[in-house]
Amino acid sequence: MPLPLIYHEDYSPDFPPEHRFPMDKFRLLHDHLVDSNVVRSADLLRPALCPPAILALAHAPDYIERYLAGELSRDDQRRLGLPWSEAVARRTVRAVGGSILAAEQALQHGMACHLAGGTHHAHYDHPAGFCIFNDLAVISRYFLECGRVGRVLIFDCDVHQGDGTARILKDTPDAITVSLHCESNFPARKANSDWDIALPRGMGDVAYLQVVEQALDYLLPLYQPDLVLYDAGVDVHQDDALGYLKLTDAGVAARDETVLRRCLVRGIPIMAVIGGGYSKDRQALARRHGILHHTAKKVWENQ
Ligand SMILES: [Zn+2]
């Protein structure tokens, strides 16, 4: 069977084109993956909306209600940095559904990739940094509570710290939060993940890959998770507008391959989300996010 890939047309709603958040990147990523024969559009798995009761496993019910009604406070809107519309709210809830579906597919088949997801700055009762609901925290709680897994490990390689995930899951001992991030970058006030691996500005491929390999070779045997959630943010790239690391395309591909293979050889199901990536050149950005899916397909077909 083909590698399970998850996408929905809701992901890129109408949005101000000059906005700092590249809302069209999901559609452009889809088009890029279809054009480069990674997937046929008809084979993509399309998720349902995530029910509010499942969002509430990681978020305050009144925050969920306020966001869905378009009634966030001005402070919250400023922290979020995204305008509200019914279509944006819908894509937000749909994308959490997509991450749940990706995790389900990974548990069934060993590996799955989302064409969105990784909203790791979202907190229990407020948004931050373009993130509204925290898919990584929701999935962790959901699969732990329904007993499908005994332990989840979140391997967050977005260049920014997964502060929302760390805070929401700090009292969930069976969800292990690992964040590899550039030390001097957003958020200014860091949370405490179970493992924070802070990287210096300007780090390049070789040093970065060593850290990734060492972290996996230590943490996977230590925790033996039943599911890994991998945030494959490409804001570690040298051309990213918001990152300060210096990875090349080849470095990003090597990172993705390392993480995916390390899990597969241990028989640990892994689902990947695309995480952050920022550039005015939206086509280049879509191709950069697509490195994950190209690499995953290669790994999937050569297991
Ligand atoms: Zn980021």
Image (cartoon, rainbow, N blue to C red):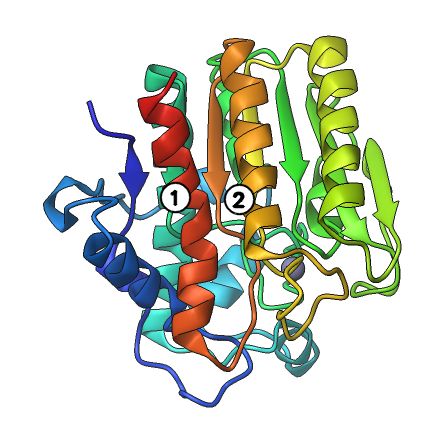
On the rendered structure, is 15 left or right of 39? right
Specify the quarter for ligand 1: bottom right
Is residue 299 visible in the rendered image? The answer is yes
Q: Helix, strand or loop at disc 1?
A: helix
Give how far apart the Cα atoms at labels 2 and 1 are.
10 Å
Q: Which residue is mark 1?
A: 293
Judged left or right of residue 189, residue 1 is left
Left or right, 161 with respect to 59, comes to: right
What residue is at 65 percent from the left and 51 percent from the top?
158
* Of residues 267 and 250, the one drawn nearer to the viewer in this rendering: 250
Name the kind of residue labelled 1 in the image: His
In the displayed structure, 8 sits above or below 128; it is above
Mark 2: which amino acid? Ala
Whether residue 60 is visible = no
Label located before the other in sequence (2 or 1): 2
Under circle 2, the secondary element is helix
- Please give the residue where the numbered disc 2 appears in the rendered image: 253
Residue placed at 62% from the left, 70% from the top?
239
Residue situated furthest left in the rendering: 42
Query: Which of the two discs, 2 and 1, sits closer to the camera?
Result: 2
Looking at the rendered image, the quarter that the N terminus falls into is top left
Using the image, determine if residue 194 lies above or below residue 116: above
Image height of 145 relative to 119, above or below: above
Where is residue 252 shown, x and y percent of the image? 58, 48
* Image position, residue 54 (x, y; %): 45, 38
